[in-house]
Image (cartoon, coloured by chain):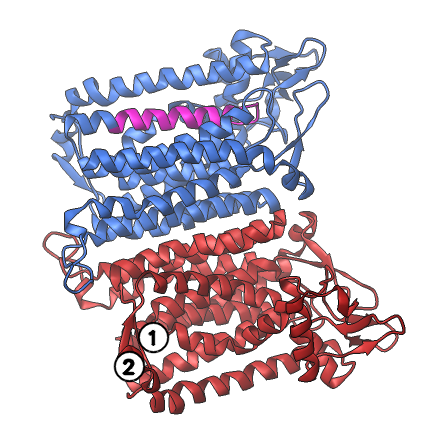
Chain colours: A blue, B red
């Protein structure tokens, strides 16, 4: 029966893909008229590109899932209507039903807030507050349905803390922070054509492969089916968006898409019970975040935009830079910069007056530091390559290594 | 216990009111910067007023309810956590829980779509399609939790059809159409300062009085408590908005608010099982809709804007008009116009060339036909007065008359 349900989900996803591909060009004028567009700075003619298309594919995603929700229950014997009374049977799996609805509430909330952010240009504190709020329904369902806040420890830690530790409320704090991280991590590894959608596609595909692997191994069937229900339509709609967002971008995705993608991943990670594995698929985003911290938290001067610089003559991207005098930095800032410089993670150029010019601390700039000026399309491809490699690493950690540290 | 839960809901609503009152002026610049503003055409200086504030109060409403949702279950013995296992008890009222979450999903979806409409200026077909889609989660929950599609007939009809009729799928069509009607009915009785919020406040207050009456009578306790949980925060946030939206408006509410209000009413009407009573509270909107039909469906020429005309000299509102030659109209159009003219529901002025000038068919213009040029503030007050009177009529129909036609 599960196979039929997933097949129907796949069929809905294919329709969603076809519909989205048709819709995206048709909505162009509407977005431009609403002044939702931005200049593509890394092109010779700096064309105006309609922005915030995440809202469109988010809507298609929601509608697809609204239509899909009744399906799993149609094929579930426990949910079959009582023929005599026409009412629900006592066995109806309300807990599964509420999981689907709450997951959609969190995602819908996040698409809405992302769009509000695109239109109203919200402040940084809102960007941290909003995903936290949008996760509340999810955490409530987790509390009601599972409330399992115990983490299993690896062998080497068991001598000190025992086999498992119940971290109680902190598990909810962790899950709330996971949602904040997922939504913002994609948002800060962004800015060149196709990168937001490209990385999301690879993460989603990784989750799908992981879900299928676990299903084949017979682990936690319900959780992984639940995840697939969301990941397939997400992949379909994002793939349609990718068609128009890849280099050269005909549409931009906006914060809406990053929030939508991040929340979808957080939802399947939390309610699918694989939040730690999910974080493994976010390795490049974690690396980008750690690499960015000196600038994000202003230990090192941070210009308003950290995107690579475009050279119109060669059509290549160069690193963008920040400059400072080492004496301006606080102790922490100086330590961070010294570590990065020693590990050759940043470029370093000293001027005669003692000031230093270095690249901005983003993964995109790092790729340019290593490989020199590169074409925009190639930078995206390289970063997507990194994402794929990290997924392979994640699978090695998740299976052989985890089997070693935790008994299976 | 119910009293405590409602008291907490009221306390959250008061906080929501205070917060919204503080937030509204602070977001002004953000809305103007995002070009979300419109000219107030019925003022001498036609000031630019920030638009779409429904999105702000919608967010406060959602957050209030997110925070409230755990409360009813905290005080519900059936939902008390199993102390030994730390897990959910088998008696946890999942069906109540999913009702709250699905209701919020529908409302959140509608706020989002309303905001998208304000920003992107969607087409008419979307305005009918979107509320239908947003109602799907609601209908699913209704199907799962009740699936009661039987309507009780009044005495006089029982001779022909029996005591009750099961209308099956048509009951769902009716509920879907109810949502479409509620969201759009408020949207078309709008356009002068404070009217959208004013009418919504009165409808919400009517629902609240009805819920309290039913609670006192001991009818369907659960349904009416459910309704109060939504109506109180709605009243609180709308009251805060009213403070800034009443004449002279410092902020406009946008389609977002109309959709938000309409969907909230539809949700409590459907899941609270009083959709017919709800429609009674919409009497002025129904009258406005029926009165508008000749123009809405283009049997009579309909100008793009049907708002009253502002006379800067006297600061009063006059009727806005449409003109046509009776021969231009189709048969249906001519019948409609003749009926309206005979019943003196429209103004009628014949020109020498046979063309006719008449007011546009909206309730606002009708008030001006009857009372002549009136100040904008007074028009809103008159229409709110009509709304209050209709509520009184509704209560007379609901209680003495319904008791007569249906045995209690």
**Can residue A373 be seen by looking at this rendering?**
yes
Q: Main secondary structure of the magenta part?
A: helix
Count up the numbered dots.
2
* B284 lies above or below A261: below
* Membership of A206 in magenta stretch: yes
Identify the image quadrant of residue B22. bottom right
Chain letter of mark 1 equals: B
Return the x and y of residue A23 as percentages of the image width and height: 54, 36
**Most distant residue in the left direction:** B84
Give the labeled residue for mark 2.
B219
Residue at 41% over, 49% down: A134
Return the x and y of residue A52 as percentages of the image width and height: 57, 38
> What whole-number distance in Å separates the C-alpha atoms at marks 2 and 1?
8 Å
Say whether marks 2 and 1 touch (CB < 8 Å). Answer: yes
Return the x and y of residue A207 as percentages of the image width and height: 32, 28
N-terminal of the pair, mark 2 or mark 1, is: 2
User: Is residue A27 toward the left or the right of residue B131 in the image?
Assistant: right
Nearest the viewer among B305 and A153 is B305
* B146 lies above or below B203: above
Give the labeled residue for mark 1.
B224
**Can residue B115 be seen by looking at this rendering?**
no
Near mark 1 (Cα within 10 A), the count class, few <14, some 14-19 or many ≥20, is: many
Q: Quadrant of the C terminus of chain A?
A: top left
Q: Quadrant of the N terminus of chain A?
A: top left
Residue at 67% over, 52% down: B36
Looking at the rendering, the stretch of residues picked out in magenta corresponds to: A190-211
* B258 lies above or below B313: above
Residue at 31% over, 77% down: B3
* Membership of B151 in magenta stretch: no
User: Is residue A135 toward the left or the right of residue B204 in the image?
Assistant: left
């Amino acid at each position: 029966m599960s196979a039929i349900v997933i097949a129907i989900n796949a069929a809905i996803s294919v329709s969603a893909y076809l519909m989205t591909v048709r819709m995206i060009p048709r909505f162009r004028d509407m977005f431009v008229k609403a002044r939702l567009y931005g200049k593509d700075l890394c092109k010779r003619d700096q064309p105006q590109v309609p922005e915030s298309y995440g809202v469109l594919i988010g809507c298609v995603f929601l509608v697809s899932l609204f239509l899909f929700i009744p399906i799993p229950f149609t094929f579930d014997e426990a949910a079959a209507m009582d023929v005599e009374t026409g009412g629900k049977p006592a066995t109806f799996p309300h807990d599964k039903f509420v999981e689907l609805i709450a997951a959609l509430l969190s995602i819908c909330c996040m698409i809405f807030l992302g769009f509000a952010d695109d239109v109203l240009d919200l402040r940084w504190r809102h960007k941290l507050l909003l995903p936290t709020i949008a996760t509340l329904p999810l955490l409530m369902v987790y509390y009601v349905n599972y409330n399992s806040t115990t983490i299993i420890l690896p062998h080497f830690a068991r001598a000190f803390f025992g086999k498992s530790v119940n971290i109680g409320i902190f598990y909810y704090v962790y899950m709330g922070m996971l949602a904040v991280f997922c939504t913002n991590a994609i948002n800060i590894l962004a800015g060149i054509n196709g990168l937001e959608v490209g990385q999301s596609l690879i993460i989603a595909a990784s989750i799908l492969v992981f879900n299928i692997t676990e299903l084949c191994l017979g682990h936690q069937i319900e959780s992984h089916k639940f995840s697939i229900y969301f990941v397939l339509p997400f992949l379909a709609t994002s793939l349609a968006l990718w068609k128009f967002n890849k280099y050269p971008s005909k549409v931009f995705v906006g914060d809406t898409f990053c929030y939508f993608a991040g929340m979808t991943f957080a939802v399947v990670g939390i309610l699918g019970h694989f939040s730690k594995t999910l974080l493994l698929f976010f390795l490049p985003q974690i690396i980008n975040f750690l690499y960015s911290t000196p600038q994000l938290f202003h230990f090192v001067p941070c210009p308003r935009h950290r995107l690579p610089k475009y050279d119109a003559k060669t059509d290549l991207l160069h690193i963008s830079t920040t400059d400072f005098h080492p004496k301006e930095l606080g102790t922490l800032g100086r330590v961070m910069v010294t570590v990065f410089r020693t590990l050759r993670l940043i470029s370093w150029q000293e001027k005669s007056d003692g000031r230093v010019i270095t690249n901005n601390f983003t993964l995109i700039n790092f790729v340019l530091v290593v490989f020199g000026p590169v074409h925009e399309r190639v930078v995206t491809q390289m970063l997507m390559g990194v994402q794929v490699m990290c997924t392979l690493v994640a699978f090695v950690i998740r299976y052989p290594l985890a089997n070693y540290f935790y008994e299976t």
